[in-house]
Amino acid sequence: MTARLLTALVALVVLAGCTATPAETVRLRVLASAELADMAPLLAELRAETGIELELDPRGTVDATESLTPGQYRHDLAWLSSDRHFQLKLRESGYAGPKPLSTSTMMSPVVLGLTRQAAEQLGSAPSWADIADRAAAGELRFAMGDPASTGSGLAALVGVATAAAGTGRALRTEDVACDRLSGFRVGHRLSADNSRDLVAEYLAHQSELDGLVTYESTLMTLNDSGRVAEPLRIVYPADGIVQADYPLLLLDPSKRAAYDRVVEWLRSAPVQQRIMDRTARRPVNPEVPRSPRLSAEPANSLYFPDEYQVIDTLLANYRTGPRQVIFALDFSGSMRGARMAALRTAFADLTGAGEAGFSRFHQGERLTVIRFGGRVIDQREFTIGGPADLAAVRDFVGVEAYDTSTAVWSAVDHAYDLAAQLGPGEVSVVVMTDGLSNTGITESELLARVRATRTPLFAVRFGEADPAASAGSGCPSRRRPSAQAPSTGRTRRPSAATWRRRSPPASSGWWCRRCNARATSSTSICVAAKSPVVVP
């Protein structure tokens, strides 16, 4: 064997040894807006080209923001449709530590997609005020993400309120209460907790709706898919839009090198072109020319509120869920002690004395509270107008008066009788109990009576509650009593064991299994679900 051949063989062996052991993959956990699921093919290319894998934890943008505790992050990065809400939260918290590094990666405005007939009726270059007026008249029915959970829903709400205020500046608290907002709300017929689920809900109910409020990119992708009965016409409100810029935030400073590499890759011209071609999002790299359908500039961008309190007030004045809630509370003798204390803690959260955040009762909200045992012990209606009304609710729940038996289904039946007087779509029923129903009508009798109603039922259980009351097959708490009824707001059912103890046991507190939001107790109201949840 010649020396030259030997050298060549040695070189091949060395090269084979090098290629047999690829560079170790760097994995980063990323809290992400749910619609970024469409980036999966590109993220596979990111891993192949850089060795960095992004593991997305998808949620509604607002829900994701609420789960971010300044300085106590549980992810390496966050990739949200917008970080404006988070920046307000950061400032409001008084956190003195360093702010997470934030870099925009792509853009998409929040707009309307309407059927041909609805777009023609609305006219050319409509404003948010025109849209709200048409909705108030019952002539425009649309699907939109819940503003308390989704970035697109909140952005649309900010757009409507800002345009309605007509001040030419960012919203202030005193600008929020306006009739235009109420009119817009009337048209909001279908909701979801993230943009991805919103599309699925819209497709299932598109024959009942006139359009969809979401990101421009989502509408273009939906039209391209051929899944809509007819292509939706994209409407850019003339008085302005709120733009999503999808910033990537560095939550763990020790991952700075990987973060910089990801940002460099995402903002590079070839990748920006791929993002635009595959997801219809606008490039942030000025070197990349926009495709023809994205070449036109949308209306001017509206200011996002610069105070956290404005967002809170805005959501408090906009309700996508039922207009009234009927609570049926178990006051049988077995509820004495810790169980009743847990129930009252839940009501403390709802009345603003706890940490329920956006889930608390809002001004103008109406509720009926029933205390029951083997019969209805007492009931009272409340309209929340201020602190005195919230205190009155706590006082009513705080009465020490118990019965010796439990008629769960009879109490729920009584609640449905009250709901029937309010009309469909205006009310929900919540039952809170700890035990088996041992008197009154049966579950089957209740189901036979309420099967045709559109009023949803939620259950919160304590201790050894009958599993059928909250998680049993066919129980109304697990589904709408009428599966054929169209959705008229938030219809997500709470699931069993939604709240869990955080691991490890040494970490105190309760955390939502769905959104990781912190709770004051296992019977708190889930910030993500915006409704009472079933607990273990």
Image (cartoon, rainbow, N blue to C red):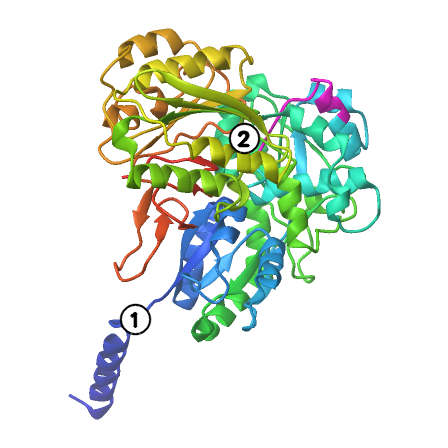
Residue 66 image point, x, y percent: 51, 51
Front residue of 299/507: it is: 507
- Considering every residue shown, the one lying at the far bottom of the view is 3
Q: Is residue 170 left or right of residue 153?
A: right
Quarter of the image containing the C terminus?
top left
Q: Which residue is mark 1?
A: 22
Is 138 magenta? The answer is yes
Q: Is residue 390 left or right of residue 257?
A: right
Residue 149 appears anywhere in the view:
no
Residue 451 image point, x, y percent: 38, 10
Q: Is residue 471 above or below residue 476?
A: below
Say how many tags the image has: 2
Front residue of 213/407: it is: 407
Residue 222's image quarter?
Answer: top right
Q: Which mark is residue 191?
A: 2
**What secondary structure is marked by label 1?**
loop
Pointer 2 or 1: first along the chain: 1
Front residue of 223/60: it is: 60
Region of the chain picked out in magenta, as a range: 133-144
Residue 329 image point, x, y percent: 38, 27
Q: Which mark is residue 179?
A: none
Residue 252's image quarter?
Answer: bottom left
Amino acid type indicated by mark 1: Pro
Q: Residue at x 25, y 14 (%)?
A: 439
**What secondary structure is marked by label 2?**
loop
Q: Residue at x 31, y 71 (%)?
A: 24
Mark 2, mark 1: which one is toward the viewer? 2
CA gap, disc 2 and disc 1: 46 Å
Residue 43 appears anywhere in the view:
yes
Q: Residues within 10 Å of mark 1 (few under 14, many from 20)?
A: few
Q: Is residue 278 left or right of residue 37?
A: right
Q: Is residue 384 above or below residue 345?
A: above
